[in-house]
Amino acid sequence: MQRLKSTKALAIVFFASGIFDLGGVFYYSFLVGTGRSIESPPTHSFYAILIASFLFCFAYLQLLSAFNIRRYLLIIGSVIISRIFYAVLLFACMFFVTDFPTTFLPTAILDLAWTIIYIVLTLISDQVRFRDLFLPYQGDS
C-alpha cells in the first residue's frame, strides 16, 4: 500500500468535513424546529439554534485547522471522539427507545464515514501517527 508522504489529503478532507458541518449550521438554523420544515422529532427552535451554534464552532475549528493540520492534530482527535459519541448515542436511542425517530440517521452515518476517512488517512500517512490525534506531540521518539 502506498503511504502518504504529506498531510495534504488529511487537510483537504478535514476542510471538506468543516464545510459539511457548515451545511449543518444552516440546516439546524433554518429548517429544524417547531413551525419549520422539519418538525419530527418535535424540537424547540432554541435547541435547533443551540445545535447550530455547536456545529458552527465545530466547523470553524475544522476549517482553520486544515490550514496547519500538523499543528492541530489534537483537534482531529477531538472531532473523531465527538462524531463517534454522537453516532453511538443516536444508534443507542434508535435501538432502545420505543418509536425514536430516524430523522437524523443520515447525519450519524456521514459522521461515521468522516471518522473512518480521518482514521484511514492517518494510518496510511508517513507523517502522522494515530496517537498524534489524541496525545500531545512529545518530539521525535
Image (tube, grey):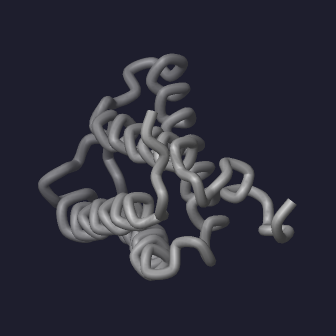
Q: Is residue 16 visible?
A: yes
Position of 121 compared to 49: left or right? right
**Residue at image x 55%, y 49%?**
122
Vertical placement of residue 117 versus 77, above or below: above
**Residue at image x 57%, y 61%?**
76
Q: Nearer the viewer, residue 14 or 44?
A: 14
Total labels drawn: 0
**Residue at image x 19%, y 68%?**
30
**Residue at image x 54%, y 18%?**
96
Q: Nearer the viewer, residue 83 or 29?
A: 83
Q: Nearer the viewer, residue 76 or 100?
A: 76
Q: Which quarter shows the C terminus?
A: bottom right
Report x, y in % for residue 87: 49, 37
Vertical placement of residue 120 versus 8, above or below: above
Report x, y in % for residue 10: 44, 59
**Picture quadrant of residue 102:** top left
Position of 139 compared to 33: left or right? right
Q: Is residue 28 visible?
A: no
Report x, y in % for residue 51: 43, 64
Position of 39 compared to 116: left or right? left
Q: Which quarter shows the N terminus?
A: top left
Report x, y in % for residue 49: 37, 70
**Picture quadrant of residue 113:** top left
